[in-house]
Image: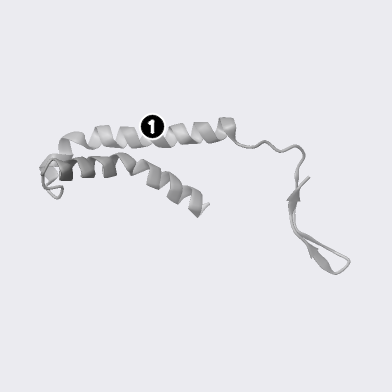
Amino acid sequence: MLRRFLEEFGLFLIPFAVFLVYLLAAGRNPLRAGHWNPHLTRLALAGLLIVIGTLVYDGVFSERREGGYIPAHMENGHLVPGRFQ
């Protein structure tokens, strides 16, 4: 679950990283708040659109499984790993 959160957070940060590269390429100081303030709303919306787009993509194109999940259990003294049936 934490891995999934970190992946989505990383995707959210992509527009901010691209804007940082743009500021550096344009010769502007990326540490000045004046360069960021007018663009924060658009960058946040772009990040949210990327995250929502990837969630929709995963929901539409992810692998579907028939049957249910059988959790790990003991059989004859041996641990049988969990699996999808």
- Horizontal side, residue 36 vs residue 51: left or right: left
Structural crowding at the residue carrying mark 1, measured as other residues with C-alpha within 10 Å and reported as few (<14), some (14–19) or many (≥20): some
Mark 1 lies on residue = 49
Residue at horizontal 13%, vertical 40%? 26
Please provide percent x and percent y for residue 40.
23, 37
**Residue 73: quarter of image:** bottom right
- Horizontal side, residue 14 vs residue 32: left or right: right
Nearer the observer, 34 or 62? 62
Q: Quadrant of the C terminus?
A: top right
Q: Residue furthest front?
A: 25
Residue at horizontal 32%, vertical 33%? 46
Q: Residue furthest right?
A: 76
Residue at horizontal 75%, vertical 37%? 66
Query: Which colour style is shown?
Result: one colour
Q: Residue furthest bottom?
A: 77
Nearer the observer, 1 or 65? 65
- Horizontal side, residue 49 vs residue 3: left or right: left
**Residue 59: quarter of image:** top right
**Residue 23: quarter of image:** top left
| Secondary structure under the numbered disc 1 in the rendered image | helix
Q: How many marks?
A: 1
**Which kind of residue does numbered mark 1 sit on?**
Leu
Please provide percent x and percent y for residue 16.
27, 42
